Image (cartoon, rainbow, N blue to C red):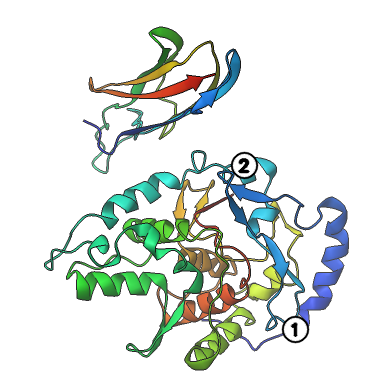
Amino acid sequence: MASGVKPRVKVPKTASAGETITIKTLISHKMESGQRKDDDGNVIPRSIINRFVADFNGQNIIDVTLEPAISTNPYFQFEAIVPESGEFQFTWYDDDGSVYETSKAIEVS
Amino acid sequence: MTRQTRVRAGAAIGVVAGVLAVAAHAGPDDDDLVINGEIEIVTETAAPEHIEHVGTIYSGWRFRSDETQAFQVDDFDNPSMIWVEQAEEVWNTAEGAAGKSCASCHDGSDSMAGVRAVYPKWNEDAGEVRTLEMQINDCRENRMQAETWKYTGGEMVNMVALLSAVSRGIPVNVAIDGPAQSTWEMGKDIYYTRYGQLELSCANCHEDNYGNMIRADHLSQGQINGFPTYRLKNTKLNAVHARFKGCVRDTRAETFAPGSPEFVALELYVASRGNGLSVEGPSVRN
């Protein structure tokens, strides 16, 4: 398992109904491409986050496929319209089968 | 070491180059820096009295493009913060034969607010001017009985970044009088000494020509209030002595070693040129 993996998310705590908010996400991850070789000439096996998904109250809002060319600590920033109070659920899928999850609640007035 | 006597005649050349470059690129911009919407950063202020040739001092942030500046406005966008978080864990983790962590003596890392701003600082017991790095290693060796860190190594620069982060917004205020004065004088001497095959002193670029372009680089005043600095060119945190080394190397000179008495003195002098600017590290530069 890749070490030092930690998801981070920034979502506003409050918003008004129908407002477009900006969501920022970052996961610390090596994103080893599988193209590099170590000092002995052996290929370092690929180990990347291959998928990132965000849901709001169970409804999918973004689903990203990541490729080996994406650099260390992948950062995603995107916008979402929030119709009601609820919870954003973020999920990252690692090549090694690990799944990293975090969630953020938002209050809509 | 190529070491020549101090030459101030370079100013005349600087003026000619300045006229040519001003048309292409002016000095610092007029942007204001507020981090996380709450920490107001002083990026421009009157120069301390001891500086003879500069009237206003500016943080290097003011010489960067809007895109680079934006990284620093929100901690979430500042790539340095990943290492600051790692240092926070180290802060709270006991290590060494004494079974102590930093927090065992100092409480939370935010209790160190203001410390970064006054370093390098005279240490009475040791009888020398000490940088934050030297003080950290002293703590590790004598209080924690742990292995010392490499002066510009990853763990060290992360810890310095954490200590800077909790001091952001506090004005740099290093003492240059009293017992620190001789070290400060030595640093000043190094600042104005031309080194290397290119025969450049710190002052030739950062005092005579800040605001001008040196090929593709927009020269700043070389202030160190933003260190450690995340640089886009090498995507990691850079310690101030590593930056000094890079600068001296670029003059094609043999450089001093990070942690050497020469660089400690230079750090004190350069820090004192920024007295009045806010601690801004860990900053983002190109």
Q: Chain of mark 1?
A: B
Question: What amino acid type should be assigned to the residue bearing mark 1?
Answer: Arg
Q: Position of residue A86 (x, y in %)?
A: 43, 16
Residue B253 position in % (x across, y down): 54, 73
Q: Residue at x 56, y 74 (%)?
A: B173
Q: Classify B175 as above or below A31.
A: below
Residue farthest to the left, as pictured: B97
Q: Indicate the secondary structure of the residue bearing disc 1.
A: loop
Residue B32 versus residue A106: which sits nearer the camera? A106
Q: Answer above or below: position of B109 versus B133.
A: above
- Kindly report which numbered mark, 1 or 2, lies closer to the viewer in this rendering: 2
Query: Is B2 in front, or is B35?
Result: B35
Residue A81 position (above or below residue B286): above
Tag 2: residue type?
Ala
Residues packed near mark 2 inside 10 Å, few (<14), some (14 to 19) or many (20 plus): some
- Identify residue for label 1: B8
Q: Are marks 1 and 2 on the same chain?
A: yes
**From this viewpoint, is residue B92 visible?**
yes
Q: Which residue is mark 2?
A: B70
The x and y percentages for residue B109 are 35, 58
Q: Nearer the viewer, residue B237 or A100?
A: A100
Earlier along the polypeptide chain: callout 1 or callout 2?
1
Residue lying at 59% horizontally and 63% vertically, measured from the top left = B278
Picture disc at residue A80: none
Q: In this rendering, does residue B200 appear at all?
A: no
